[in-house]
Amino acid sequence: MSSQVKTWHGSINQPTFLQERSTFDKHTLGVTSLDINLGQEYLVTGDMSGHIRLFNLRDNTLYKDIDSGALGCWKVAFNTKGNQVISMSQSGNVSVWSVETGEKLRNFQNSSSSGSNHAKQSCLNFALSPNGEQIAISGADGVVSVYELESGKKLNQIQAHVSQPIRALCYSLDSQYIFTGSDDCEIRMHDPQSSKPYISSFQSHNSFILSIAVSPDGKRLASSGADKKVCIWDIKQKKLDHTFQGHTDQIWSLSFSQDSTKLISVSDDCSIVCYSLSKI
Amino acid sequence: MNNNNNSNNGIHSGGRYVYIPIRGIDQHGIKIDLDEPLPNSEDLLNILKAELAPLEIWLKLAIEYYNQDKNDDFLAILESVLDPELEEYYYDSKFERVSMLTALASYFTILGANEKEKTKKDQHFLSAVSHFNKAIRIDSRIASSLTLVGRAILYLYKNDSDNAFRDLSKVVTELTQDTLPVLPAKIGYACLLFNKGQYVKALEQYQKVIELNPNYSPQVRLGLGYCYYKLGKINRAKESFQRVLQLDENNVEALIGMATIVMNDGFITEAMEILLKAYKIAPANSVVLYHLANHYFYKGDYNRCIQLATAASKETEVLQIKVECYYQIGRSYHAMERWQEAQQWYYQSSSRDKTFYLAQYGLGQIHIYNGEYDKAIQAFEQVLTLQPNNYETLQILGTLYKHSSNRSKELTDKMRSILKKITTMRPEEYSNWIELAQLLESTPEEASQALDAYHKGIQLMKQQNITPGSEIMNNYAVLKHQRGLYAEAEQIYLSIISDSGSDLMEFRSKNVTTTYNLARLYEVSKQMERAIPLYKGLLKEHPNYIDCYLRLGSIAQSSGNFYEASEWYKEALRISPNNPDAWAMYANMHMERGEWYPAQKKFEQMIEVNRNETYASLSLANIYYNSKQSVSSDKVQRFLEISENYYKRVLQKSPNNIFAANGLAIITAEKGSIDVSWEMFVQLREAALDCHAISINLAHICSARGFHNNAIKLYDECLKKLVGQQGNTKNQKEIEQVLMYLAKAYYDSRRYQECKQTLKKILAYQPGSQAVEYNMALCVEQFANTYLDKYSKSMSEMQSLMKELEYSKSNLFKLHDGVKSNPKLPYSVTKSKNHYQSIDSLLTKFGELYTKMEKEETDIAKKREEDRVTREKEQEDKKQKELEKAAEAQAKADEELKRLEEIQRDLLQQHNAKLAELQQANEKEDSSKKRKGKKSSKDQDFIDEDYVGSPKSKSKKDKKSSKSSKKSKDRKKKKSKSKRDQEDQEDEENQVEEGVDNDDDVNNNNNEDETMENQENNKSEETKDEQQDDRSMQVDQETKSDEKSIENDNSKNNDDDDNDLFGSDSEQQ
């Protein structure tokens, strides 16, 4: 976790493959999360002091600096349209901000009824459904809560993993399923409408799962974990397609390219690795 | 001496008649008809002596006697040659004398060979040897061929085949001329070659002999037959034997040979006929007897077999046949199930000839029958050394090893190698694969090989349409289960249950193990909703299945339902009150919840049941150690001692228990002898590099001794190992813990940036951790403090630090505001309040400093601004001046112009005057006028130029002035710098004043440090933040690893169950 954000520029064909484009360093202590909106116009970052910053990527300037409060913001993301920023604190306070004005539009508090000790259980991650309707919040207690993004109304609660922190989750392309990756080394597929624990389970990782992502064409699921592996899954057949072992330390995050042919992962070994998926 | 002639006569007369030449009279002699019985030897001797007949004739006659079975006469004649008188006389006919001596020796040899009585036999052989020696003494050259053959034969009879071979090969290679004894030599040589197993060479020799003399003794063909037989050319062998029998139908050896061949062809009755014939001819021939015995054995007539074999063994002196006979007897008794006799005879056989493996084999079988497995193993191992690829022996040994009483590592190694050999020898035998798998599955490292073996075995069984036993399938599935191939294992479990013809939910007793395993599988793969009903169903049908209770308890425990868990454990204990696993798991649950007292009770219960329960003792020691925090200080010492005693007790029982050693080292450290404990940990770490608890403890000690870098290195290593370890959720907490230690080490070594980085890493794992927030604040505070002392500061750094401070401040505020002091909190509220205040003051200080710096900065900026203004002023002045100058110049120019104009006017006036004067010379005047006009225009041009030029020069000057102003600026800058330096100095002076404040701060910090240490010593207030007692936490880790070991135990138990079940099924021998 650094206090700097770097943007990179490059194509696979170049030998250096990535060139540093610009560095943003206005953050306190550490950057917790970041996202780029649809038109690649803005970069949003959240830092440990709870500031949400919007950068204009056209001219690499700070566009907006929003103080979301002392509780901090653990995760930020743009909505599907790219005109709003959703932020969540560790305590599960979800806020929606306008990109244009930087004003807070609304907020709601995630509450899970799993038990009295929930107050201690922090929220780890959230995912927005591609259709823009839902937000799913995962916590350290293994519970996924689904809310209507517009109203903040709670739709469902899934005991997705038994008392295991869920550090990674994402929606399928059609927003019909939620995938969760947890410390119990499993990726599970859930129906956001039902409270059934899970529909199916993908098992290949040997350690905590830190990040999962669905490809933009909706066919593949990529997962990475503390076991230094990147796994590519076929969603339809629910089977493991390929495993990459290019990193020497745990892999914190990964992301697909827009055309779903490439995957990029970043790890504690301080390296970024890009994979070509066209051959598998 | 006409010996030569006479001898010629003698030889020629050989055959039917022998002429003894009469001395002095040629062509005359005494004619002796050889076809008639020979006269008395005495008469003949007299004649021979009297006539001094050539020795050749003597020999001839002697042989004739021999041929007519008149051995005494033969001896008389030959022995007379030994008479010294005669010897002298016939001194020159060495050859004859040698021949005669050899004949004598050979005679004795034969006598000896035929003699059964040992002493007489030796006597005969002795005299044979002496005669041979005498012959050699007469003339070694002549003697060589004859005597060597003879002696070789003697050696043969004496069973000294090496010496015989030496003599014979000498004869065969050295003497190629057609001397008489070459043929027998060759036969003997061939025979020896045969005995040495060089059948091809032997065959060659035999063939040579037959080529040289086709009508030689049928024995040659016999040899030929044996060779063919041994070389596998059975038909040729048969032909040879038939030929022998044609020549000599009573040849026993040929008959035996024939019988063997016929028998091997499957014509038992014919073979028996032949054998019986041989028996009639030679009722005492041991080989015949042996073969007969063999036959009767196969016919099942054991008594007769024993009789015949006993007879055969008595008839022979040849060890091999004897041994075979004994074996035959033993085998018969064995078949008659008279074990003791069989064992005796087998022993007789095997002790005489260690290389006779058949007897060993039989002996081994008897040992198995008697249940003396170790002895049996010995016997079979003996067989195996002789016959390393004997499949049956390998198989038997494999099974034997399995049932052997001592299961040493050596034994399993042997067993593994044997089973692997078997499986490579006969990969189509499924039973071997299964055996191998069963061996391999007991050692966890070879589980994958075991799995392969099972796979092959089961595949083969399916090919042969044999349905593998459910035990095999179960074990196969367990292996897959253990390797994490849950889906496959589940499939197998389910198919076992469905194959058994009952439903999964019927919980039939035959399926109990499988169902339990299936439930375990569901449990491991986190499908609790499937596992729990299975366990419960099992309990309904089989209420005494303790493991089910324990598993149910464990499930409840891991999902946080401690009450339910304790109910399950209690249930288990109700059924089996002394079950150590149940007690241990129950106690562990208490430990997990930090309920030391009930846990202690439970462990004490375990020790009561079994005083040597290592796990309970260890846990108790840990409990005492851990609970010393919660008791008053006077009791701490006592608790430490109790804990130490427990550790020591464990170590006494199992000196290699790393956990106990670790605990002891911790207590040593606790008692203050850090150096001693450091040494202990270093040693322990060498002994158990993989035990990260020890590395961590060592790191703690390093840290305590001030070796922060070493500590950091150790923590880093541990971290790498932990991250590298796979798939344990408890790992996560350990990693966080170690990261915390690492952060603390960085903090101690004043590497605040790295400390921050580490803390952030923890936060990435566990967002919202109060301990991290607290520590982060502390770290930021310290860093800010040190930053204050830093000589050069930058505004931007200050700014970010202030931001961080503010963040820490808000965090600390959150941590202490409205929070009641609570020992369960991972930090101390009062301390956080203190830190909050100190950070607050720091912040104000920073703020002041910052504003000061800002002021300075603005001052400088102002100065710069002023400079700039003055510079601009100067510039303007200069400009002004320039302008003035320019104006002056302009004025001058104007003046000049005016002057010029005046001049012009003057000139004009002059001109006009002149014009008036010089009106006559108009033209001249005009031209001059023109000229002047030109001049004036030129002048005007100049002015113009001058006018234009002046601003140019001005601009140049401007440039120059700007340059100079730059220089001055620089100078000013320098000045300002020096000014700043001065100011800095002033600042420093100020800071000295401030330093007092700082000192105060430092003191405060020191105090804090002290309190930190105090707290480390007291370990009473803070429990979990940076200054917490690291070591006590470590013990927690230990118990965790202990828990692991208990889990392992459980799984082992399961396996044991399986194996037990299997063992009963697989007692195949």
Image (spheres, rainbow, N blue to C red):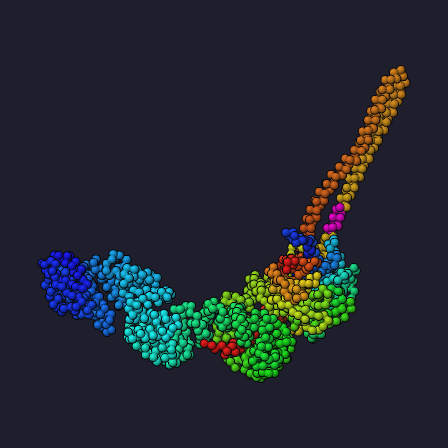
The answer to whether any part of residue B201 appears in the image is yes
Left or right position of B938 against B133 = right
Comparing A202 with B926, the one in front is A202
Q: Where is B857 relative to B490, above or below?
A: above
Q: Main secondary structure of the magenta part?
A: helix
Left or right position of A67 against B540 = right
Q: Where is B923 relative to B536, above or below?
A: above
Q: Is residue B863 magenta?
A: yes
Q: Residue furthest top?
A: B920
Q: Considering the image in quadrants, where does the N terminus of chain B appear?
A: bottom left
Q: Residue furthest bottom?
A: B574
Q: Magenta segment, which residues?
A: B859-868
Comparing A125 with A175, the one in front is A175
Left or right position of B238 against B185 = right
Question: What residue do we see at 60% from left, 66% from top?
Answer: A206
Q: How many marks?
A: 0
Q: Where is A23 relative to B533, above or below?
A: above
Q: Residue B293: x percent and y percent?
A: 34, 76
Comparing A226 with B373, the one in front is B373
Comparing B143 with B404, the one in front is B143
Question: What residue do we see at 58% from left, 72% from top?
Answer: B489
Quadrant housing residue B315: bottom left
The answer to whether any part of residue B351 appears in the image is no
Q: Residue B635: x percent and y percent?
A: 56, 77
Quadrant housing residue B23: bottom left
Question: What residue do we see at 54% from left, 72% from top?
Answer: B462
